[in-house]
Image (spheres, grey):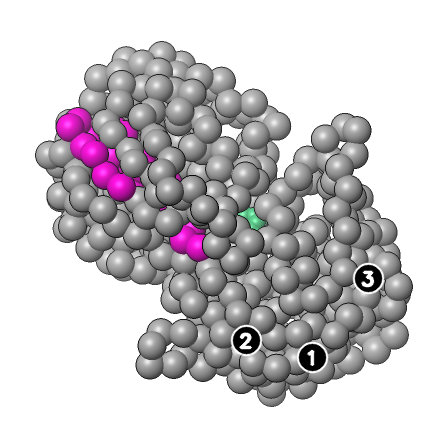
Amino acid sequence: MKPVVSQQSSALTGSIRVPGDKSISHRALMFGAMAVGETKVTGLLEGEDVLCTAAAMRSLGASVEQCDDGTWVIKGRGVGGFSEPTGVLDMGNSGTAARLLMGVLATQSFTTFMTGDASLCSRPMERVMKPLRPIGVSFVSRENGRMPIAIQGTSAPMPISYELPVASAQVKSAVMLAGLNAPGKTTVIEPNPSRDHTEKMLQHFGAEVEVEETDKGGRVITLTGQPELVARDVIVPTDPSSAAFPVVAALITPGSKITVEAVGMNPLRTGLFATLKEMGGKITEENVRIDAGEEVADLVVEYSELTGVTVPASRAPSMIDEYPVLAVAASFAKGTTHMEGLEELRVKESDRLAVVVESLKACGVDVTEGEDFMIVNATGEAALGGGEIKSRLDHRIAMSFIVFGLASQKPVTIDDGSPIDTSFPGFIDLMNGLGAKIS
Ligand code: S3P
């Protein structure tokens, strides 16, 4: 346990760069390990979640090494070329690593055992197992599809077509990754588009992936199986989900003006920035460019008087990880913020809907929890603070309430800041470098 105290700070100023994108980093390691040749990755997130993926790739027979210049080099095994690991794969806190790997391992002809920390072992895996079973894999899990699990991969995979019942990039990716090693075409239909890093990066590695928009705003993704993935260099943009924390900190801390450099601006990831702008947040995108197929921009953010807004359910997939920190921004805004379509928040690293509500209440905020919505009422004055927050193995809860404490009247204490290292190593030092008072 690493307790953290966050106190009202004077203006935040300066220029920072947050670490690499977590979603893209996991995929770069996995796809590099399935490609033929040597993949070089720059800007990889060296957080605990991604390091679990690196270790899993090594256990499966790929070579994954970090060079002196910080670049990561992966020597791949080809699609379907992994070897049976001797031990149990430990995916730590990472749902993305576990679920994407379940797809990969579904079509390797051996049995893999996989586990994770207490948070990961409480998360639903049936949503991935259900579409994968018709491909030919079988699973043994704890009750209700909870980890640890055993994955008995098939040597004769069948391609499938699957319509996602929830917008989930992890489920979509798991099906596509299983489809990579199946003959013929694998199709995933998503009702509401989720992050498309798997589609983009598989194309980058030479796979044939077609994406069609449906009349109803959804997508049909078709992958041609058994391509030869060819090693490619990957430049990982910085993570918009990590940039979210300094961005909201600057918006709510009076007098602040900061620049967050080279933020990944994939349109399926930027719902938070759109919402904050609607709330009156002064966020300007400068130097917009494309880096290795992904949009990137420098964000200039100034303290702003925010007002409450309604955030529609249709925007949830593009900001699914950002609701805890949006709820913090809403606590400093004038008026009511309605956040709708939040049912997926209940199955993240913690039940984020319940934990955000309990933590906001502990900090004196007027908040209402519904089954799939949250309403925050605030006056536009500095929120009270003073809460003692339990981070519950959830990095984004820890960082959100550290941000809260920078602008609230009383300090906020977090019982354990150690989960931050899963996605944002160096967070506290980076924020203190801007003038934050976090100890
Ligand atoms: C991710 C997808 C999202 C997100 C997670 C990363 C990914 O999860 O919450 O942090 O990299 O595919 P879901 O697929 O469960 O929505």
Query: Residue 354 location in percent, x, y?
Result: 46, 35
Query: Residue 70 location in percent, x, y?
Result: 35, 74
Mark found first going from the N terminus, 3 or 2: 2
- CA gap, disc 3 and disc 2: 22 Å
Q: Residue at x 74, y 74 (%)?
A: 228
Label 1 beta carbon less than 8 Å to ligand 1: no
Is 327 rendered above or below residue 2?
A: above
Could you tell whether 205 is left or right of 238 in the image?
Answer: right
Q: Which residue is mark 1?
A: 78
Q: Which residue is mark 3?
A: 224
Q: Residue at x 68, y 60 (%)?
A: 203
- CA gap, disc 1 and disc 3: 16 Å
Q: Quadrant of residue 258?
A: top left
Q: What secondary structure is marked by label 2? A: strand
- Nearest to the observer: residue 39 or residue 132: 39
Could you tell whether 414 is left or right of 236 in the image?
Answer: left
* Other residues around mark 1 within 10 Å, as few (<14) / some (14–19) / many (≥20): many
Mark found first going from the N terminus, 1 or 3: 1
* Other residues around mark 2 within 10 Å, as few (<14) / some (14–19) / many (≥20): many
- CA gap, disc 2 and disc 1: 12 Å
Highlighted range, magenta: 237-259
Give the residue type at disc 3. Thr
Give the residue type at disc 1. Gly
Could you tell whether 294 is left or right of 214 in the image?
Answer: left
Q: What secondary structure is marked by label 1? A: loop
Mark found first going from the N terminus, 2 or 1: 2
Q: What secondary structure is marked by label 3? A: strand
Image marks 2 and 1: residues in contact by CB distance under 8 Å: no
